[in-house]
Amino acid sequence: MAETQSYRREVTVKSEHGLHIRPCTVLAQSAMKFQSRIHLNKPGMQVDAKSILDLMTLAAAPGAVLELEVDGPDAAEAIEHLAALFDSGFAPTPAEAKPSAAVSVG
Amino acid sequence: MKLCDFVVADAIVPDLTAGNKEAAIREMVASLRQSGSVKAEDEDGIVAAILKREELGSTGIGNGVAVPHTKHASVDKLVATVALAREGVDFASLDGEPVFILFLLVSPPDRPGDHLRGLENISRHLRNQSFCKFLRQSKDKSAILELLQEADNNEL
């Protein structure tokens, strides 16, 4: 069995309008591809990065600095992937622009 | 910011008749127009902008909830309405399930912070299973309004 790894990294919200629904959707859908537990922290608050509703409660504005916290067997890969999403400002990729196509339905 | 600060009481739709996504959005924007929150001449433009936003990815975010929205220069403050679809509406949701609770937001383009705070507020309550359950059980406009007030006062 793979060992559990833990990583933390500071990320900055670069998307023009902050963490509104679309970035939250992209982030949660990406986080769900990993087995690891993934949290996003801001002072006094920790949310599950796999939940769109949780992420929206951060109301993170452009420029906000948050902490990604990843624990699990694929944590190293997850933190790189998710930090890159923050760096890209959540630019939609073709797959993620059409979530209905990205989500397997049965 | 509280729900009752931006959800227009008169525009609440307790029993959506629309059978599909576009009709649901039209019905909710029409309700905002009837309440005087958006002007008749802006109605079609707002509907078109919301539908365009849906093309980027459905705002049906799972768990029977959708949050269609747009920025539009015709409003000078965040306005929203809530609708209940008793039979469920296919919203091309992320989880493939029909939508029963809809919050529709229209915000001024120059105040993105209001939109974020509105979303924060709505999502915080939608995370609460009791809120979703009681909302779906609310029979009419006044029951929904009462529930929103209770949620604002953290009485759930």
Image (spheres, grey):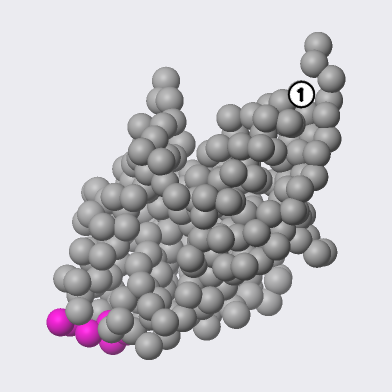
From the viewer's perspective, is residue B109 above or below residue A11?
below
Q: Circle 1 sits on which residue? A: A73
Letter of the chain that mark 1 sits on in the rendering: A
Q: Is residue B79 visible?
A: no
Relative placement, left or right, of B54 versus B2 is: left
**Magenta stretch?**
B34-41
Q: Is residue B29 visible?
A: yes
Foreground residue, B155 or B102? B102
| Label 1: which secondary element | loop
Q: Is residue A31 magenta?
A: no
From the viewer's perspective, is residue B149 above or below residue A97?
below
* Quarter the N terminus of chain B occupies: bottom right
Foreground residue, B101 or A37? A37
Is the magenta region chiefly helix, strand or loop?
A: loop
Amino acid identity at mark 1: Pro
* Quarter the C terminus of chain B occupies: bottom right
Relative placement, left or right, of A37 versus B7 is: right
Q: Residue at x 49, y 67 (%)?
A: A17
Q: Residue at x 46, y 53 (%)?
A: A22
Q: Residue at x 24, y 49 (%)?
A: B19
**The quarter of the displayed image where residue B106 is located:** bottom left
Horizontal and vertical percent for residue A42? 76, 61
**The quarter of the displayed image where residue B16 is located:** bottom left
